[in-house]
Image (tube, helix red, strand yellow):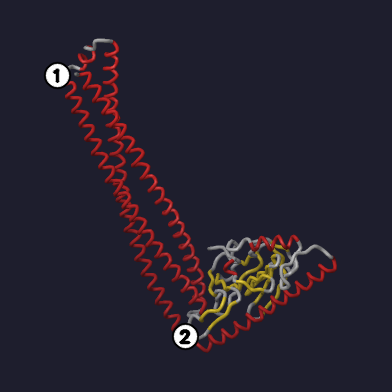
Amino acid sequence: MLRSISHTTIRHSQYFLKGVLVVLMVGLWTMQSSAQSQLKRSRAQLEKEKADIQKRLREYDTILKKTTAEKRNTLGELKAVTQKLETRITYINTLNREVLLINREINATEKSITSLENDLENLKEEYSNMIYTSYKLHQGVNVITFIFSAKTFKQFYMRLRYLRQYSEARKKQVDQMNKVNEELAYQQIALQDKKKEKEMVLAQEQTEKTQLDRLKNEQEGIVNNLTQKEQELKKEIAAARKQQEDLNRLIKSVIAEEIRLAEANAKEKDSRTTTTSASRIPLTPEGAAISTSFAGNKGKIPWPVESGFISKRYGTFPHPTLKGIMETNDGIDIQTNNGETVRSVFDGVVTKITTVPGMGGTIIIRHGDFYTMYSRLKTVAVKSGQEITAKTIIGTVNADKDGISELHFQTWKGLEVMDPSIWLSRK
């Protein structure tokens, strides 16, 4: 009878213990590990977005401070305030997403705690059953007597082995309960930390909303003051339109002349060239390679200035303060710091260096049959005909009478003007 009870009890305890270990280690840990890994990846991405936005906000603060130090209530100041306002809205949305993520982490931690508590109860119950069974098994019988009452050596060995396994099973059960207790304590601390973090993010979000309201009021005040300068603004719009036309004539004449000279040289030398259209320059194999490389880097080309934002986009759009007035831009304007370094966005050859009234220094660079143009420069650091690489310093940005520093940047393919923003990398 003792042997039967011992054998059955021990084997049942072993099977149960193995089952508990498998469920805990494979089921609980795998599920929790997968969920935690996913949340960590989401958190890492969110933190990167927050850092990028905060960097842009600091950048816009610097530009705005230098702008307002020169003169109040200008279009440049309005653009900087608007850009900062829009970026702060993005930041608040990011904080909202962070709160949602923290809520998911809190829910996952609470589920983990509940699961651990249930597992701990099951382990305690099983351990209690093992103790009770052990008591019943040896009730009235000494362990030594039980071992040495064996009729054969094999029976003696089996009884000794069963008792050793039974003892090990109980020890493993205790170890497992201790591990679950430790993990439970860790998860409870993590839960409290997550709740504190949520409170901090909510407080930060409220601070950002207060700053946003202040920026909205500041923007509204600038718009109201600028509206009162309607005639002055209309003169500025007309002057900008004329400057744009002068720039377009300049770059078209430069490209057309290069096409004419390239075609003449190709016929004279009878060299192998590549051309896709009558409006594009015939290319040598080297030029075709650069052109193909430029085309293949759409959305990856570095900005012509390291710091700044697009203050006037490409195309036709309403004026920011004057109703019924439309503006057209064949490039993009990038508002930046006074004296900011200007860089070539790609490998190429400096084709033209000149000065355009109202636009300051202007540089045209050829990249195969693509062209980039940089205007409103204060200084020029390259020479006509010079071969340059991407990010080569070509000059510095000038500031206008209001203290606004804007680089005018254009991209062309042959005689076809293009939207520069589609080529630039995401900041």
Q: Which picture quadrant has residue 377? A: bottom right
Is residue 386 shown left or right of residue 193?
right
Q: Position of residue 210 (x, y in %)?
A: 36, 70
Q: Distance between the residues labelled 2 and 1?
A: 103 Å
**Above or below, 172 relative to 322:** above
Residue drawn at point x = 29 percent, y = 25 percent: 168
Viewer-closest of 109 and 87: 109
- Outermost residue on the top side: it is 152
Q: Position of residue 270 (x, y in %)?
A: 84, 65
Q: Which picture quadrant has residue 88? A: bottom left
Helix, strand or loop at disc 1?
Answer: loop
Of the two numbered discs 2 and 1 in the rendering, the one whose residue sits closer to the viewer: 1
Indicate the quadrant containing the N terminus: top left, top right, bottom left or bottom right. top left
Residue drawn at point x = 41 percent, y = 48 percent: 37
Q: Position of residue 70 (x, y in %)?
A: 52, 77
Q: Mark 1 points at which residue?
A: 140
Residue drawn at point x = 23 percent, y = 15 percent: 147
Please give the label number shown on residue 227.
2
Residue 170 visible in image: no
Is residue 36 shown left or right of residue 235?
left
Please give the label number shown on residue 116.
none
- Outermost residue on the right side: it is 268
Three-letter code, disc 2: Thr
Q: For label 2, count other residues whose C-alpha is less than 10 Å away and answer few (under 14), some (14-19) or many (20+).
A: some
Q: Which tag, 2 or 1, sits closer to the chain's start?
A: 1
Residue 361 visible in image: yes
Viewer-closest of 323 and 408: 323
Q: Which picture quadrant has residue 171? A: top left
Viewer-closest of 210 and 22: 22
Three-letter code, disc 1: Gly
Helix, strand or loop at disc 2?
Answer: helix
